[in-house]
Image (cartoon, rainbow, N blue to C red):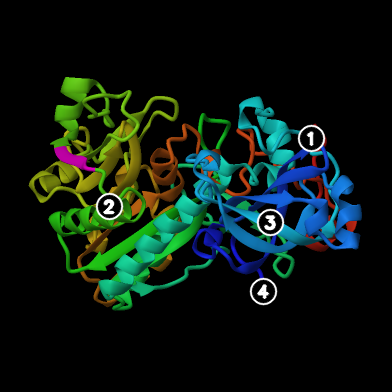
Amino acid sequence: MKVNNIETVNKIGENVVLKGWVNTVRKMSKMAFVDLRDRSGIVQVVLIPSELDEASQALMTEIKPEYVLEISGIVNKRGEKQINPDMATGTVEVLAKSIKILNQAETPPFEIDNEEHQANEELRLKYRYLDLRHARMANNIKVRHAVIRAMREFFYGQDFLEIETPFLSKSTPEGARDFLVPSRNYNGKFYALPQSPQQYKQMLMVAGMEKYFQIVRCFRDEDQRGDRQAEFTQLDVEMSFVEQNDIIALAEKIVAAVMQAVKPGIKYSLTSMTYAEAMAKYNSDKPDMRQDKNDPNEYAFLWVTDFPMFEYKEGDKRWGAVHHPFTALNPEDLHLLEKKELEPIRAWQYDLVLNGNEIGGGSIRTHDPKILHKVFEVLGHSDKEIQGKFGHLLEAFKYGVPPHGGIAFGLDRFVAILCGETSIREVMAFPKTSDNRDPLMDSPSEVDQEQLNELGISLKKK
């Protein structure tokens, strides 16, 4: 059975079977050194013809980088002068006794061993399965796994229910364009991919689930905009019978669990201020609170609270919700809603900022259907539009909705910061380009006319 490379440090004197990829091969006179790579790391293998069987001797000259090998051999302790302190397995090497080439490999379009000669992003994404072989990229994926595992284990220990919500949903205005999915059975009608599970999780609170979470994909058909992705992952949390401080306290425990899992021993700061204070002092609603911004191991978390509920959108000449229309208004400002004095109204909204990046945000929700209906009205929706777009939620609210609130963490951004990356694409297995293309799968792509006919869709020529 295959032994992971990292395990060789504990198997000195034992016969082992290793399987993996050739990271590098160095041929010296009659012998050769192979750095063999598997998911756990790299180990040095020594190939000496006199130690190999006849078939393996013949294969020595064929071995090239990225070939997939099976090697049987003995783990030996390295001499003091041969120890490599930069390798996790640098205290040992494996003396090969037999070699099998499990598969050959063509020369990759970019170097795997040396990330200093980094290919451009288009090429990296086209050959993402090769890009993920880089040590840095493989480590990023492992950190992402560790973060998700820490989150799940935390919530299981807090008696939360992990509940999945649908990907095929209804198009509703939530701030960005929806990805629409045509229905074959109901020509002319469309599903939409969810921008977030916002309404579903609120209806789960109506259902009496009380404590819900999920690691969920979200979809937003946004124009090219910096470090954004058409699909992204968030930790989604909702609770009943809570106040703002309860959600904030829970989120701080999540942060502690994650930091302990991936940055043990690293101290971090956690402070808070209101939106008004942040704007007055830093002219930003997500200021970077680090003392030394050049210190890669400094993590400064900041809560920003008391956001305005509404903002005037000059382009549309109308008022919109800063967060979303389901956010509860500060009770002290409720009287301003009736007067339609919208600008000073504060929301029970809170954002979590890390090193100048928003990584989480949430709110206490409006659970009074009359107030929710009034909010929709001031946002410019007619009674007919409210019923058509939100009638299902208002109907649910007729049947005893509890006070509730929640928070969502942007998982990709959180992991990117913990990995020291500036782009979320570096911590996603198969991301899109900044203009929402997938060079690996060559998508988006055209589809057959037959498929369009089934869906009752005709394309308009530009």
Does the image show residue 285? Answer: yes
Inter-mark Cα distance, 1 to 2: 39 Å
Label 3 close to label 2 by CB (< 8 Å): no
Q: Is residue 189 above or below residue 185?
A: above
The kind of residue on which mark 1 rests is Pro
Residue found 33% across the figure and 77% down from its top = 207
Q: What's the distance in space between the residues labelled 3 and 2, CA to CA?
A: 45 Å
- Labels 1, 2: front one: 1
Q: Select label 4 or label 1 by which is in front.
A: 4
The alpha-carbon separation of the residues under discs 4 and 1 comes to 32 Å
Location of residue 129 in the rendering, given as x and y in whole percent from the top left corner: 70, 48
Residue type at mark 3 is Leu
* Residue 250 percent across, percent down from the top left: 21, 59
Magenta extent: 267-272
Q: Name the residue under label 2.
A: 255
Measured in 3D between alpha carbons, the distance from the residue under mark 4 to the one under mark 3, in whole angstroms, is 18 Å
Give coordinates of residue 360: x percent, y percent. 33, 46
Residue type (three-letter) at the residue carrying disc 2: Val
Q: Is residue 458 above or below residue 215?
A: above
Q: Which of 449 and 85 is in front in this view?
A: 85
Which residue: 40% across, 55% down? 147
Side (left or right) of 34 relative to 446: left
- 165 vs 127, left or right, is left
Q: If you read the primary sequence from the N terminus, does the residue marked by circle 3 or circle 2 appear first?
A: 3
Q: Is residue 158 left or right of residue 138?
A: left
Mark 4 and mark 2 lie on one chain; the one further toward the N terminus is 4
Residue under label 1, please give it. Answer: 109
